[in-house]
Image (tube, rainbow, N blue to C red):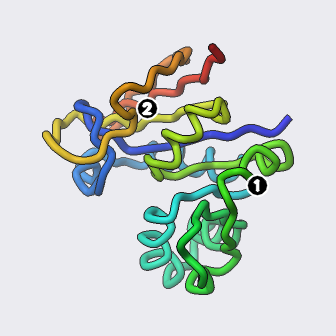
Amino acid sequence: MSTLTTICFISLDGVVEDPAWSMDFQSDDTGELNSELLFAADAMLLGRGTWEGFAEAWPSRSGDPFTDRFNAMPKHVVTSTLDDLSKWNNSHAVAFDDVRALRQQQNLLVWGSPTLVQSLLREGLVDEVVLLVSPVTVGAGQRLFADGDAHRLRFGAPTLLSGGMLAVRAEAVAG
């Protein structure tokens, strides 16, 4: 059975927007966890905004296994407004209604994309949430969990990463 996993850098106060604040807490084991998730996935599923940011940064990078895999793998972009996705190879637009079928066919990894993740959680399409929690409060910015949304998650054992981040893996629980 295929799975849909989300991964997100998040502050202690729940902010996920523009996570440059997480850089001070990243370490080799942060990269190892990211690589584990990336290489377990068949394709990425991205929201429009995250795709646009990644499409500016990633296509010019190459030369290591993570970057080469990140750039080469299929990228499903949930959008109704982007027409030209040629800036980043192997990217194509999908409607949100297509995600359920994609999830049955492929192991999907969602990077960031908080608005998309909120919708996926509401629809019960998320199998695992991976949070890379930085020991910092940001004060303002987009949050991963929307006001009014309630979700049940089952934590696995958290991992304190050497840079000071806490990796929290949680299985989404139906109902």
Q: Secondary structure at mark 1?
A: loop
**Mark 1, other Cα within 10 Å: few <14 / some 14–19 / many ≥20:** some
- Residue 49 higher or lower than 86, as above or below: above
Residue 37 shown left or right of residue 159 in the figure: right
Q: Nearer the viewer, residue 39 or 45?
A: 45
Residue type of the residue flagged with mark 2: Ala
Residue at the image point whose x is 43% and y is 76% from the top: 57
Q: Which residue is mark 1?
A: 42
Residue 60 shown left or right of residue 163 in the figure: right
Which disc number belongs to residue 155?
A: none
**Farthest residue in the left direction?**
139
Residue at the image point whose x is 52% and y is 43% from the top: 117
Residue 21 shown left or right of residue 95 in the figure: left
Q: Nearer the viewer, residue 67 or 87?
A: 87
Residue type of the residue flagged with mark 1: Asp
- Residue 96 higher or lower than 145, as above or below: below
Corner quadrant of residue 63: bottom right
Q: Which residue is mark 2?
A: 167
**What x and y, as percent, mark residue 81?**
53, 72
Corner quadrant of residue 104: top right
Residue at the image point whose x is 71% and y is 58% from the top: 43
Quadrant where the C terminus is found in the figure: top right
Q: Nearer the viewer, residue 145 or 148?
A: 148
**What x and y, as percent, mark residue 18?**
29, 57
Residue at the image point whose x is 69% and y is 52% from the top: 39
**What x and y, as percent, mark residue 123?**
63, 33
Residue mark closest to the camera, 2 vs 1: 1
* Distance between mark 2 and mark 1 Cα atoms: 22 Å
